[in-house]
């Protein structure tokens, strides 16, 4: 932890949930969570984590336009995940916004056959998306998405796994109608998809991370 703080610091850290028996935001920004359903505290990658049943468990992060989770440009989201086999269904680690309603959804997903998808939308039909080449099911995996300008990167266990050039650099919007850990909200009136597995150590930055920073988060987080 000390090595990590020295190398990366807290610059741009707008949300940090260690999930060690609580849902407090340890970034100092006050984005504390609210538990819904019955996610269970279990042994995590480091300390404790929360196990989600894939049915109705999630953590809501109160958010609104103009707050520090209202990310509109470069960003990074990372977490330790230990996912059960999801089949062909979206299972969100972290998501904000509605997909169908064209509000931006910066979602780090366990998606379809257990691969990670980083996904987002603009106010119109433009969207960005990238899938990991490696599967992330059945064991602890450190997943990181980084958006820098028009480049979207996915890191698995600290190493670059895939990247994608987007068509909408810094044009994406975020109305922050919902921010959730463990739930993906398809639309304000449609399906909800819940994570099945364990989540630990979620971090959100309002800046991009370098490849070295992504690696050191994996090594020392």
Image (tube, rainbow, N blue to C red):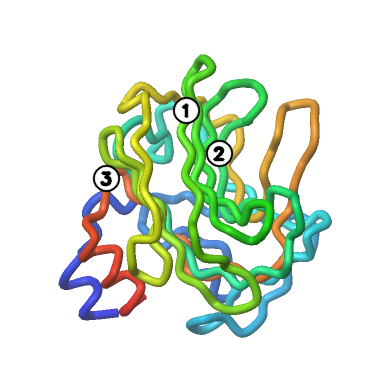
Query: What is the x, y in percent for residue 182?
Result: 65, 55
Label 2 Cα neighbours within 10 Å, binned few <14 / some 14-19 / many ≥20: many
Rounded to the nearest whole Å, what is the CA distance between mark 3 and mark 1? 15 Å
- Which of the image's four quarters has the C terminus? bottom left
Task: Please state if 54 lies on the left or on the right of 101 as rendered.
Answer: right
Q: Residue at x 54, y 35 (%)?
A: 105
Secondary structure of the residue carrying tag 2 is strand
Are circles 2 and 1 on residues that touch, CB within 8 Å?
Answer: yes
> Residue 75 occupies which quadrant of the picture?
top left
- Relative to residue 57, is residue 152 depicted above or below? above
Q: Between disc 2 and disc 3, whose residue precedes?
A: 2
The N terminus, quarter of image: bottom left
Rendered view: 166 above or below 115: above
In the structure shown, which secondary structural element does the residue marked by tag 1 occupy?
A: loop
State the residue at coordinates (26%, 72%): 216
x and y percent of residue 197 in the render? 69, 69
Label 2 – label 1 distance at C-alpha: 8 Å
Q: Which of 18/141 is in front?
A: 141
Q: Is residue 74 left or right of residue 199?
A: left
Q: Residue at x 61, y 85 (%)?
A: 43
The answer to whether the residue labelled 3 contacts the one labelled 1, judged by CB atoms less than 8 Å apart, is no
| Disc 1: which residue | 174
User: Which residue is identified by label 3?
Assistant: 207
Q: Which mark is residue 96?
A: 2
The CA distance from mark 2 to mark 3 is 17 Å
> For residue 153, which numbered disc appears in the image?
none
């Amino acid at each position: 932890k000390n090595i990590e703080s020295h190398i990366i610091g807290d610059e741009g850290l707008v949300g940090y949930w260690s999930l060690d028996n609580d849902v407090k935001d340890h970034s100092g920004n006050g984005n504390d969570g609210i538990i819904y359903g019955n996610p269970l505290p279990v042994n995590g990658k480091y300390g404790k984590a929360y196990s989600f049943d894939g049915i109705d468990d999630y953590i809501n992060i109160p958010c609104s336009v103009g707050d520090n989770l209202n990310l509109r440009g470069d960003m990074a989201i990372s977490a330790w995940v230990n996912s059960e086999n999801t089949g062909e269904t979206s299972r969100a680690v972290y998501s904000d916004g509605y997909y169908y309603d064209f509000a931006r959804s910066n979602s780090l997903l366990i998606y379809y056959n257990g691969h990670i998808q980083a996904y987002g939308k603009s106010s119109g039909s433009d969207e960005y998306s990238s899938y990991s080449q490696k599967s992330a099911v059945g064991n602890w995996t450190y997943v990181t998405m980084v958006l820098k300008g028009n480049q979207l990167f996915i890191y698995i266990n600290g190493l670059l796994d895939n990247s994608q050039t987007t068509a909408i650099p810094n044009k994406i919007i975020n109305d922050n109608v919902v921010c959730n850990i463990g739930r993906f909200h398809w639309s304000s009136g449609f399906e909800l998809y819940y994570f099945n597995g364990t989540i630990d150590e979620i971090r959100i930055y309002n800046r991009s991370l370098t490849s070295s920073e992504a690696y050191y988060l994996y090594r020392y987080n």
